[in-house]
Image (spheres, rainbow, N blue to C red):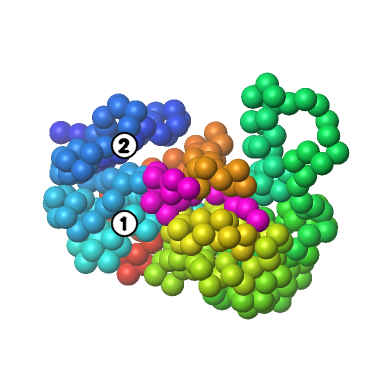
Amino acid sequence: MSSKPKVFLTRGLPAPTMRRLESETELIFQDIDRALSRDELLAGVRDADGMICLLSDQIDAELLDAASRLKVVSNYAVGFNNIDVDAATARGIAVTNTPGVLADSTADMAWALLMAAARRVVEGDELVRSGEWEGWEPMQLLGTEVTGATLGIVGLGQIGQAIARRARGFDMNVLYWSRTRRSKNLEQQLQVQYCELDELLGSSDYLSINVALCEDTRHLLSKAEFEQMKPSSIVINTSRGAVIDEQALVEALRQGAIAGAALDVFEHEPQVTPDLRKMPNVVLAPHLGSATDRTRCQMGELAVSNCLAACAGQVPPHLVNKTWHPKD
């Protein structure tokens, strides 16, 4: 009989992660390049000791009840709003995530989006590809200045801090709001200034959203918030789509309450509000925040380490439900 834990993986991960899983676990995995159906998820988890899932997999009480042996749900993500953590805790199941390795790659992506929106890169790309570009013109696709502008950061966690550090190279005035104000020492180190959310909204030329999704932050930006912003401002979101009321964003863009948006995440992902796809002043990316080889491999290592630790009756390195304890 194998002493290796049975681990259910919901989708293929980078090659080094797959090699480790194949070596150290009795892997339950369907090698198909698509998200698993609900029935496939229920069937796959049934005999598993551990589960490694994605942010797009909904892990609720019904699924947890289908897995009598399950010890851990290891999320291949920093966020874990796809998991009913309370239900897992009540069933003695650990929940883990992969923090600390994707701040730089996500911050880089936020800056890529910011620059693309500010300098109208996507529109320019489309113009050149269309074959209709007739050459340089003095008023062609004029963008907005980044150097010296005011950047507002909503959420100064690891990703927000990484974004702030990058802003120094553009001599930006950086303001931030977080539900918990950071230390004076960190503010001085990052050269950022705390202000209340209302003031932040009214002062920012670029607004970067970097908060976790919870009930307090769901639709943190909606109609009233967009109305407080500058008509010239641009919103960048690399956190979670539902932090922004997507229909309110459409109306704000349509009415000129703000100038543009650059989004890597969406409220009903992978569905996107149709009007957003039609707007030239919106840059859309398919959730690429952590999409570098190195970061995705590091995430895989953390996910596997979390899973194996819990399966072995140990406290995993990145435990979400802190009241969980290994069973005797």
Q: Position of residue 218 (x, y in %)?
A: 43, 66
Tag 2 residue: 35
Q: Position of residue 122 (x, y in %)?
A: 64, 37
The N terminus is located in which quarter? top left
Residue extending furthest toward the top? 131
Q: Name the amino acid type tagged 1.
A: Ile
Segment tinted magenta in the rendering: 259-275
Q: Judge from the rendering whether residue 30 lies leftward or rightward of residue 147; answer left or right.
A: left
Where, by quadrant of the figure, is residue 149 drawn?
A: bottom right
Disc 1, SS: loop
Residue 328 higher or lower than 201, as above or below = above
Q: Name the amino acid type tagged 2.
A: Ala
Q: Residues within 10 Å of mark 1 (few under 14, many from 20)?
A: many
Answer whether residue 218 is visible to the viewer in this image.
yes
Q: Residues within 10 Å of mark 2 (few under 14, many from 20)?
A: some
Point 75% across, 47% down: residue: 143
Where, by quadrant of the figure, is residue 326 drawn?
A: bottom left
Disc number lying in front (2 or 1):
2
